[in-house]
Amino acid sequence: MPPEDFVLQRLYDYEQPLQIFTDASKRAGGFIFYQDETILLQRVFIFAESETNLPIVCLEAHTLYRAFAAVHQIELAGHRRFPEVHYHVDNVAVEATFRVGRPATFSNKDAKPILAKYVAMVNALYDPLDFGRIIFVKRVSTTENPADCLTRHDLLTSFVQFANSKSIDL
């Protein structure tokens, strides 16, 4: 078998761009890493009960920040950077906020300080000048976002309902 036929799914190619799709719902957030149409990483996390009262735009920003942090960890572990990283979100306000580096003018006034916090946290990981040059934040429709299925899975819904019925704090 020639070496080029052997493919390790979790082996990141630091010479190729990385595609990341994120989504959040009231109870959960998740992201998917793609490279060459191969899923390399999927993560789903449940929001704390205190976070579920936040506007959805804040939960989407929280999820996007977690994706930024995951990429940063991968780049630190590999001692290399990806040439381009494309983040795909299905929320207009989150896309505008991270693309320009400040909360979108049309976002909820209660959400603006929280969005500014997430922008500052991302700027601690990456140089703001990298946005639009190496890091791209793009909007996709919900129907075209593969991460949407991570936050709407039947097992996740059952888990949250069970936790609520037993008064378990998520």
Image (cartoon, grey):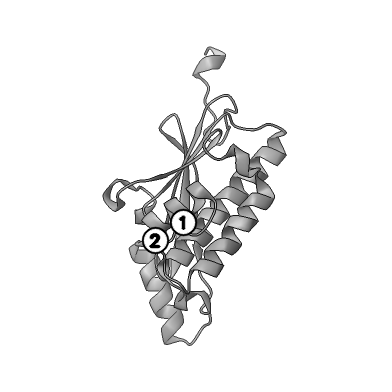
Q: Work out whether mark 2 precedes mark 1 in sequence or the reverse, and give the earlier one.
A: 1
Q: Residue at x 51, y 79 (%)?
A: 49
Residue 12 or residue 81, whichever sits in front = 81
Residue 32, compared with residue 103, is above or below; it is: above
Eyeballing the image, is 82 above or below 148? above
Q: Residue at x 30, y 45 (%)?
A: 144
Which amino acid does the dot numbered 2 rest on?
Answer: Thr
Q: Nearer the viewer, residue 74 or 101?
A: 101
* Callouts 2 and 1 close, C-beta under 8 Å: yes
Q: Position of residue 103 (x, y in %)?
A: 50, 59
21, 36: nearer the viewer: 21
**Amino acid type shown at disc 1:** Gly
Left or right of 150? Residue 82 is: right
Numbered disc 2: secondary structure: helix
Left/right placement of residue 80 relative to residue 46 reads: right
Name which residue lies at 37% across and 70% down.
157
State the residue position of label 1: 30
Residue 17 location (% of width, % of height): 51, 30
